[in-house]
Amino acid sequence: MLAKILSAAVYGIDANLIDVEVDLSGTVAEEDKFHTVGLPDAAVRESRDRVRAAMKNSGYLIPPTHITINLAPADIKKEGAGFDLPIAVGILSAYGALHSSADLTQFLLVGELGLDGGLRPVPGILSIAILARARGIANLVLPAVNAAEAAVVEGVNVFPVASLTDVIELLNSTLMGTVQRKPFRVATEALLGELHHHASDFSDVRGQQTAKRALEVAAAGGHNILMIGPPGSGKTMLAKRLPSILAPLTFEEALETTKIHSVAGVLDAARGLVAQRPFRAPHHTISDAGLIGGGAIPRPGEVSLAHNGLLFLDELPEFPRNVLEVMRQPLEDHTVTIARASMSLTFPARFMLAAAMNPCPYGYPHC
């Protein structure tokens, strides 16, 4: 018995479509039933234990057969726990838990399973929703926590689910046409308007006329700026309020910024959309990989998280020379390219740079 489920994996800030193929055949001992192929990483290989417990605790019997799971295309490394849900649904589909005439080609499933069968959120959902729309896949089934993030993409029906049992009921009822659950919706324009509020506003500043004028000119033209002054003169306070006088994000800019924050796992799930220009202020002890991104499978760094926003470097001379040197490419090209043996990924990094420093190592204007 063979079943095929559509899922997705995120690389960089974009997603690739993954076919989860499940084959049931023969009989084997309990401990040898699951075999996963297709370049899975440790988290994907461990999914067999999560899937086994989730199915058992959801009331489904695990078939006493040999289970082979293929994640195609096989030449792309798969990582993360987002394949738990499609693997479990594929096993149940091959075992007959879904309607016999089920056509799952219009469903894309992603989610991490808990041992009790509940679903947990996964990063990169916005990129996956954009992929589903581009590939013409009508329905996206995902954890309820990720629903607000995915629903900002128009043209895709987003179905939030809470458990494995909920997924099977949704698929059976939809495929048989007996019950039509309404997809989750959000009002993106209203969301942009509601979230365009800054806790630290530029209008709160009194005095500092020269510095305020310089910041206004920099904000209007998108220029980088360096503030030099003794401790307590207000450099950090002004920098924190600078995003409040930048132009509001357009919807396309908000979508692109949200993709980066979603992939990095720092997106506020309750909002689902980054509607304010980002403000990032890394400490001067940050590494070069933390600033521009890195890792075995590269993740975005601070310069990408500040995309369409402001990157503030306080105490600029305290940053290591090698950390400042790696900012050359993003400042000139507005992108960051990270090359590894297995892949090369490019992240956007168009940001306004603001920096602050003391006039001398002791912090005084006249040393």
Image: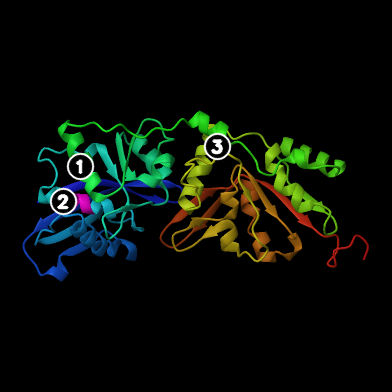
Does label 1 or label 2 sit earlier along the sequence? 2
Residue sitting at x 53%, y 53%: 337
Does label 1 or label 3 sit earlier along the sequence? 1
Does residue 362 appear left or right of residue 263 in this picture? right
Q: Which residues are magenta?
A: 88-92
Q: Is residue 289 above or below residue 130?
A: below
Give, as a three-letter code, the residue at label 1. Answer: Glu
Foreground of the two, 107 or 335: 107
Label 2: element kind:
helix
Magenta residues, dominant SS class = helix
| Residue underneath mark 2 | 92
Of badges 1 and 3, the one in the foreground is 1
Q: Is residue 55 above or below residue 320?
A: above
Give the class, few, some or many, for how many residues have Cα within 10 Å of label 2's Cα (few <14, many ≥20): many
- CA gap, disc 1 and disc 3: 37 Å
Tell me how the rendering is colored: rainbow
x, y percent for residue 274: 53, 41
Let me know if residue 90 is in the magenta part: yes
Foreground of the two, 116 or 106: 116
Give, as a three-letter code, the residue at label 2. Answer: Leu
Does label 3 or label 2 sit earlier along the sequence? 2
Q: Tag count in the figure?
A: 3
Foreground of the two, 347 or 193: 193
| Residue underneath mark 1 | 169
| Residue underneath mark 3 | 253
Discs 1, 3 touching: Cβ within 8 Å: no
Give, as a three-letter code, the residue at label 3. Answer: Glu
